[in-house]
Image (cartoon, rainbow, N blue to C red):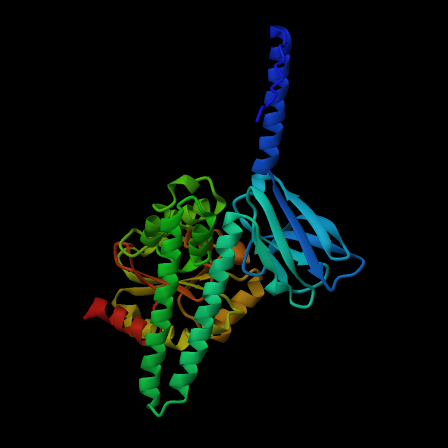
Amino acid sequence: MFVYVKTVFIKESSMKKFGGLMYLLCMLILSGCSGDACKVDGKMSDFSGETTVYLLRRTGEFTHDTLMQTVMKDGSFRLEIPRDLWGEQYSLKFGDKRSSVAFFAEQGNVRIEGSGKTIYDANVTGTPANDSWDRYQKFMLDIAKQRNLLGKEIGSSNDSDSIKRVKYTQLFQKLEGEIERYKDSLAQADANSVVPLFLYYQALQLLKYDEIDRILAKFPQLADNRYYKELKAQADVLRKISPGVMAPDFEVKTVDDGTIKLSSFRGKYLILDFWASWCGPCLAEVPNVKAVYEQYKDKGFEIYGVSLDDKKDAWVNAIEKHDLPWIHVSSLKGWECPVAKIYNVTGIPKMYLLDKEGRIVAMDLRGEALKEKVASFFN
């Protein structure tokens, strides 16, 4: 068998031009293959005509920002996410539908397929983070099935209510342990993945600063990520208001428009109480707090109430109506109260218990636990 090979001689100058063109061509091909973009392609059935698709970023428990939007035609749409938005989870909302689809923005082609009837059940695939998130969702579905099945078994047993409560607690702890181990396995498998970082971030308000420190140590490569930065900021805040540290000082207006500093109570045990006239749980706790106050007010004990009201009349009327005889202050800025931000108040009632030197001793005590702790100071 003979093979004919044609030899072509090219001048050196032509060879250089040819080489340059080949290099550019290769770069274009490689660029196209690497997918140096985040493209989101979607196909949603049960949509006809045109529907606006909104890209949403969550900013709070019930709030979000709309970052981008496009028009979906007969169920098909495409979005290209700017690089500065990569590394986060976003939601896609379709017109006035209440459900949405969550996905992670990262380099590559994200594919979303679903139905307008069950938007929440759409499949999101195509990139490592979204594939990882899909596996996590399936894992959580399996956990939910286990919880329901075992919960029914416990509920239908002939055990006493007290034994059932113990078994429910054990079941909850067991499944929560499995979830935490799953998160840890994701972090160990890929410290560059934003998915496990996001899962820790979801529990932001439940974490202590030392727990956050341990979490962040797992993701040194993601220090510029939004979730990493917010976790770190939360740890830095909590570090300043944890038991054992000096309570940050502040000065706020009183009911009569005077001012009083927190530090002016040094020498007394103190409850720093964040509340509001519209807060039902705060008012429900008043009898317990009042009982403690009446018992120890003459022994070196005080209460310093910081209201998150934004209307002075409502604040003053609540003090009078419920006969709250201790010190009261308020910036009248509602949730924008500067002191509430310093003390990481994201829900009320919120209480800090301070010793005579102004150090934080305990926080979020209620009912009998509060009474016992205060009593321990004077016994």
Query: Quadrant of the image for the C terminus?
Result: bottom left
In percent of the image, x 46 and y 39: which residue is there? 224
Count of labels shown?
0
The image shows residue 277 at horizontal and vertical percentages of 52, 68
Left or right: 318 as drawn, with respect to 268: right
Question: Residue 73 location in percent, x, y?
Answer: 77, 54
Residue 186 or residue 234, whichever sits in front: 186
* In the foreground, 361 or 133: 133
Q: Is residue 208 above or below residue 108?
A: below
Look at 43% across and 52% down and name the residue there: 196
- Left or right of 361, for residue 251: right
Tell me which corner region of the image, top left, top right, bottom left or bottom right, holds residue 206: bottom left
Q: Is residue 34 above or below residue 112?
A: above
Residue, far left: 379
Residue at 62% over, 52% down? 111
Can the viewer see residue 255? no
Quadrant in the picture for residue 143:
bottom left
**Quarter in which the N terminus is drawn:** top right
Name the outermost residue toward the bottom: 158
State whether residue 313 appears in this view: yes
In which quarter of the view is residue 63 placed?
Answer: bottom right
Most extreme residue toward the right is 49
Pick whichever, 8 or 110, lies toward us.
Answer: 8
Residue 294 position, x and y percent, is: 33, 74
Up/down of 236 relative to 352, above or below: above
Image x and y of residue 45, in percent: 71, 62
